[in-house]
Amino acid sequence: MSQATQQTPSRGKSPLRYIVMAVIAGVIACTGYFAFGGQQRVPDATFTLLSGQKISTSADLKGKVYLVNFWATSCETCMKEMPEMINTYNRFKGRGLEFVAVAMSYDAPMYVTNYAQTRNLPFKVAMDDGSVAKQFGNVQLTPTTFVIDKNGKILKRYVGEPTFAELDALLDKALNAA
């Protein structure tokens, strides 16, 4: 057998395997970008508030700057950030900020209602049946907060507690935009 046709023992992964893995990683990264980062448009979603009232992103919130905060009463970080979310809303509501706190589908409605009433949450509180979380990119981690501008563009997605100075600056800029 000639040297050209003789197979040498593999010393690890072949270069082709690295190329295939790189291509797969690239596809996953692109999919993630277009699903989350590249989407940049708020989905057409309808929230069911604790009162039973329904509000939608395409009608009721169109043309407004707003936050959508996915949270749960069982989430320690959500409970920790909620007073600052209230402060943020109170600072910006006079300038037109809207806020929808969306309780996750696994949260007991009586816990959500009790929390909203005892803490006097000043913004809209909605219960999700799972469909809204799916529309917003299959949100599973709480808290997850979206900042949406007047044109329906998602300016930022925070997973975990936001840096409130950064959030304030982002809201200030969005509310000042023509």
Image (cartoon, rainbow, N blue to C red):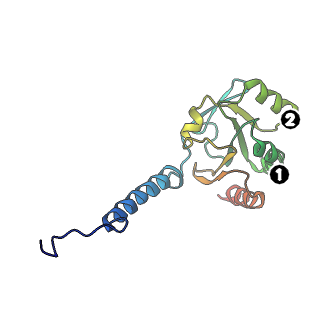
* Residue 112 % position (x, y): 76, 30
- Kindly identify the residue that appears in the image at 56 percent across and 32 percent down: 131
Compare residues 175 and 81 and report the one nearer the observer.
81
| Apparent side of residue 32 relative to residue 46 in the rendered image (left or right) | left
User: Farthest residue in the left direction?
Assistant: 1
Q: At 53% from the left edge and 49% from the top edge, which residue is drawn?
A: 41
Picture layout, residue 94 above or below residue 135: below
Quadrant of res 61: top right
Which residue sits at x=49%, y=49%?
35
Q: Amino acid at mark 2?
A: Asn
Name the residue beneath numbered marker 1.
91
Disc 1 versus disc 2: distance between alpha carbons?
16 Å
**Vertical side of 23 occupied by 93: above or below:** above
Q: Which residue is mark 2?
A: 120
Q: Earlier in the sequence, mark 1 or mark 2?
A: 1
Would you call the spot at circle 1 few (<14 residues within 10 Å), some (14-19), or many (20 or more)? few
For the image shown, how many numbered marks are present on the structure?
A: 2
The residue tagged with tag 1: helix, strand or loop?
helix
Label 2 crowd bin: few (<14), some (14–19), many (20+), radius 10 Å: few
Which amino acid is tagged 1?
Answer: Arg
Q: Where is residue 126? Give x, y as percent.
A: 70, 32
In the rendered image, the quadrant that contains the C terminus is bottom right
Provide residue 116's location: percent of width, then percent of height. Answer: 81, 32
Residue drawn at x 82%, y 37% as measured from the top left: 121
Q: Quadrant of the N terminus?
A: bottom left
Label ID, residue 38 = none
